[in-house]
Amino acid sequence: MIIVRKARLSDVSRMLPLLEEYTRQAEILPRTQDDIYRTIREWVISEADNRIIGMGSLLIMWHDLAEIRSLVVNPGYQGQGVGRGIVIQLIEEAHRLRIPKVFALTRKPDFFLRIGFQPTKIKHLPRKVNRDCVFCSKFHACDEVAVITHLTLQDRLSGSFEPSDPNGTPIIPQTKQSAIHTPYPPGISR
Ligand SMILES: CC(C)(COP(=O)(O)OP(=O)(O)OC[C@H]1O[C@@H](n2cnc3c(N)ncnc32)[C@H](O)[C@@H]1OP(=O)(O)O)[C@@H](O)C(=O)NCCC(=O)NCCS
């Protein structure tokens, strides 16, 4: 069974190899052990067969904005809805905090568009630009694409957020919902 859950400090040593592998491939920015311990509350992991098979983190940027970072799935488990499950749990966390906008900078925009994000422009994310991009060596030659999803006011007030694409189609197809178990289902921690 594939599980998606909040990360624990005891997970960190098992999270590092996958993060380091994708850092070597320049798919994500480096995350150190120290950094992960300090930010452990931001992380969601996926587990299967007693292994950590994927993870991602949610960085709060402002009262209304958060960023998905360091999203990775073990190659042997890709294409099974794991990345989607992690993103949904991160969005649920943003929802719980009443953060309406969640974005990512990515070289895999089609994955995010497929699960309901919309394209945007990095220049429309001045908090990100001023916090990180201006210090990046690729600032003037950025090869990442910005994608964003907006929670509606109704989503936030009702506490019944169900991720959907712009046409209202649920982000997790029924077939995949049953395959991924979340021990912290929507509603339990609100
Ligand atoms: C990108 C990544 C996280 C996707 O994880 P995943 O578990 O394979 O994705 P899912 O199985 O949840 O895919 C969800 C949907 O997106 C689609 N999708 C996944 N990766 C895609 C890609 N690179 N391009 C286009 N569509 C993609 C899937 O086909 C699926 O579509 P469906 O709803 O029709 O079935 C994973 O490929 C990965 O770890 N890549 C390397 C690291 C990386 O690039 N991270 C992104 C940093 S922002």
Image (cartoon, rainbow, N blue to C red):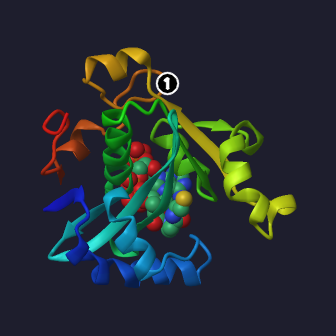
Residue 79 visible at all:
no
Q: Please name whichever residue, 3 or 9, is drawn nearer the observer in this view of the structure.
A: 9
Q: Residue at x 39, y 85 (%)?
A: 17
Q: Residue at x 29, y 63 (%)?
A: 45
| Position of residue 69 in the picture relative to residue 49 (left or right) | right
Instruction: Give the residue furthest to the right.
Output: 140
Q: Residue at x 35, y 36 (%)?
A: 97
Residue 96 position in % (x across, y down): 30, 35
Instruction: Determine the secondary structure under disc 1.
Output: loop
Against 100, residue 145 (above or below) is below
| Position of residue 39 in the picture relative to residue 14 (left or right) | right
The mark total stands at: 1
Q: Quadrant of the N terminus?
A: bottom left
Q: Quadrant of the C terminus?
A: top left
Q: Which residue is mark 1?
A: 166
| Position of residue 12 in the picture relative to residue 23 (left or right) | left
Residue 58 position in % (x across, y down): 43, 52
Against 22, residue 188 (above or below) is above
Amino acid under disc 1: Pro
Mark 1, Cα crowd under 10 Å, few <14 / some 14-19 / many 20+, is: some
Q: Please name whichever residue, 77 or 107, is drawn nearer the observer in this view of the structure.
A: 107
Residue 75 visible at all:
yes
Instruction: Give the residue furthest to the top.
Output: 154
Against 122, residue 98 (above or below) is above
| Position of residue 91 in the picture relative to residue 149 (left or right) | left
Q: Residue at x 23, y 56 (%)?
A: 4
Residue 29 position in % (x across, y down): 58, 71
